[in-house]
């Protein structure tokens, strides 16, 4: 099977996830800017999650530009990723509504960690299916960013129960690392 159907389905799921997330931002009672102040934690958690979803969508797009066909393993890995990402609106809302309390930050971080692991599994399924002589194999030879991100997530998870702010900074750091689209695949596709 070609990648086009999988990409179209995945794009739809990403759009739905973002839509659900924005619907969690309720309009406050009142007409003063000061009435928006209680929404700041929810908006900050929404902003971080929106950036994460954008990063995943972008890198997902790059993977499927670098491979030619998918098999059952790639399809299931993709569904696993989409399932974990579909939980982001819930963990985002819970963390924002509870002003970044310990348990909420931990669950949000667990959601991010599982998303990273599922993306890693999707990469591995794609590599296995395409083979060693494929474009994707050439592009993903160095996976330092993936390993470093998982390490930061694990440290942030430990920090969540003691220093939730430090934990949240760790999550933001990983987002900064991945904010620039994956140059490994972009450079490969240019050649």
Image (spheres, rainbow, N blue to C red):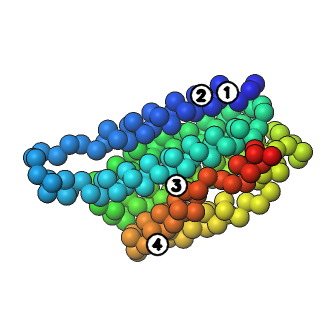
For numbered disc 2, what is the local secondary structure?
Answer: helix
Callout 3: helix, strand or loop? helix
Q: Residues within 10 Å of mark 2 (few under 14, many from 20)?
A: few
Residue linked to disc 1:
4
3D distance between C-alphas at marks 2 and 3: 23 Å
Q: Is residue 161 left or right of residue 41?
A: right
Residue 125 seen in the figure? no
Q: Nearer the viewer, mark 2 or mark 4?
A: 2
Between disc 3 and disc 1, whose residue precedes? 1
- Above or below 89: residue 70: above
Residue holding disc 3:
112
Would you name the residue on which mark 2 appears? 8
The numbered mark, 2 or 3, whose residue comes first in the sequence reads 2
Disc 4 versus disc 1: distance between alpha carbons? Answer: 41 Å
Distance between the alpha carbons at the discs numbered 3 and 1: 26 Å
User: Is there CB contact under 8 Å for labels 2 and 1?
Assistant: yes
Residue that mark 4 sits on: 159
């Amino acid at each position: 099977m070609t990648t086009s159907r999988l990409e179209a389905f995945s794009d739809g799921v990403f759009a739905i996830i973002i839509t659900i997330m924005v619907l969690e931002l309720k309009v406050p009672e009142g007409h003063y800017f000061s009435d928006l102040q209680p929404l700041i934690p929810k908006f900050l958690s929404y902003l971080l999650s929106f950036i994460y979803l954008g990063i995943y969508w972008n890198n997902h797009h790059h993977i499927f530009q670098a491979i030619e066909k998918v098999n059952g393993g790639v399809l299931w890995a993709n569904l696993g990723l989409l399932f974990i990402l579909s939980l982001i609106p819930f963990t985002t809302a819970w963390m924002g509504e509870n002003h970044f309390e310990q348990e909420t930050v931990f669950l949000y971080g667990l959601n991010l960690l599982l998303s990273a692991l599922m993306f890693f599994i999707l990469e591995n399924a794609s590599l296995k299916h395409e083979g060693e002589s494929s474009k994707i194999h050439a592009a993903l030879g160095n996976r330092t960013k993936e390993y470093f991100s998982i390490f930061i997530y694990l440290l942030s998870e430990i920090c969540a129960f003691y220093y939730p702010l430090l934990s949240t900074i760790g999550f933001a750091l990983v987002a900064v690392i991945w904010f620039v689209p994956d140059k490994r695949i972009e450079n490969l596709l240019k050649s």
